Image (cartoon, rainbow, N blue to C red):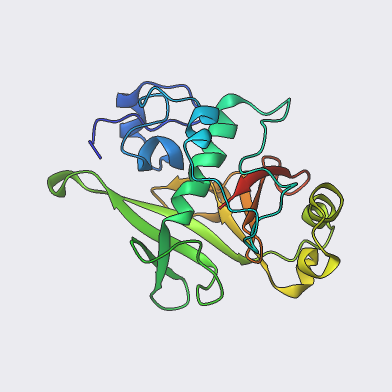
Amino acid sequence: MSSTEALETPSVKRSLSSRLRAHARKAVIPAMLLGVTLSGLGLSTAAHAADSPQCPPTAQTCRADAPWRGEQPSGVSNEDWRGANTAAQFWSEHQTVRQGNSGGYLVTGQGGWPGDTAGRGWYSFTTGPWYNRTTWWIWYGGQFWDRDNGVANHEEFDYGVSAWDANGGGGQYREYDVYAHTGTDSGIRGQMRLVRNTRNGHVYATFDHYRTFHYLGRW
């Protein structure tokens, strides 16, 4: 990735130069990790999803009534929806390497969607050329218990997932942050999260810290 690429944030509308001078920056994953943004590719989120390979109807991780990608709900901005989708793509391409109890770092090319062997904590990765590297940190949340059944209700009632596969107590849900930061202060994590069911690949996004969930797609 070029070090001159813009790091987009949904809440702070400042120039790139002022953002680079900030002591502790944060960025939605899409703008800084893809190398080019979806808009830079000339693709909308819908067009990008259409290019994805369709899941065979006989595969266990696919259900005919669960679409490959979800529809953007009203009240969710284009920026947040695009951010959640590309964050899901990012996590699907990265695995974790543990270093102690506080986290570790992320690597590509070794599968994706950190699971049982990855402890919750901060994980780092770097962007930019070798002479101007930036280290970013992002939180992997580990198991998501879904105690209020916010995800399970979608799974069972909207997509026909069995109560067993939708029960958060079964240990199948994992949670992932959408924001990356130049520091590791838990107070800067934001309210956006992804939750994935490891048994069927369904990914949900929450933009209000677990109060509501929206189906994002299958990864």
Q: Residue at x 47, y 55 (%)?
A: 92
Numbered-mark total:
0
Residue nearest the viewer, comparing 14 with 55: 55
Left or right of 95 on screen, residue 208:
right
In this rendering, does residue 28 appear at all? Answer: no
Give the image location of residue 82, x and y in percent.
53, 33
**Relative to 172, is 22 above or below?**
above
**Relative to 31, is 177 above or below?**
below
Task: Quadrant for residue 7, please give it.
Answer: top left
Left or right of 92 on screen, residue 160:
right
Give the image location of residue 34, x and y in percent.
36, 40
Q: Residue at x 22, y 36 (%)?
A: 2
Residue nearest the viewer, comparing 129 with 132: 129
Residue nearest the viewer, comparing 151 with 15: 151
Q: Residue at x 17, y 44 (%)?
A: 129
Residue nearest the viewer, comparing 80 with 208: 80
Q: Quadrant of the N terminus?
A: top left
Q: Residue furthest left?
A: 131
Give the image location of residue 59, x and y in percent.
62, 61
In this rendering, does residue 114 appear at all? Answer: yes
Q: Residue at x 85, y 66 (%)?
A: 163
Task: Quadrant for residue 24, please give it.
Answer: top left
Give the image location of residue 89, x and y in percent.
48, 47
Left or right of 103 on screen, residue 140:
right
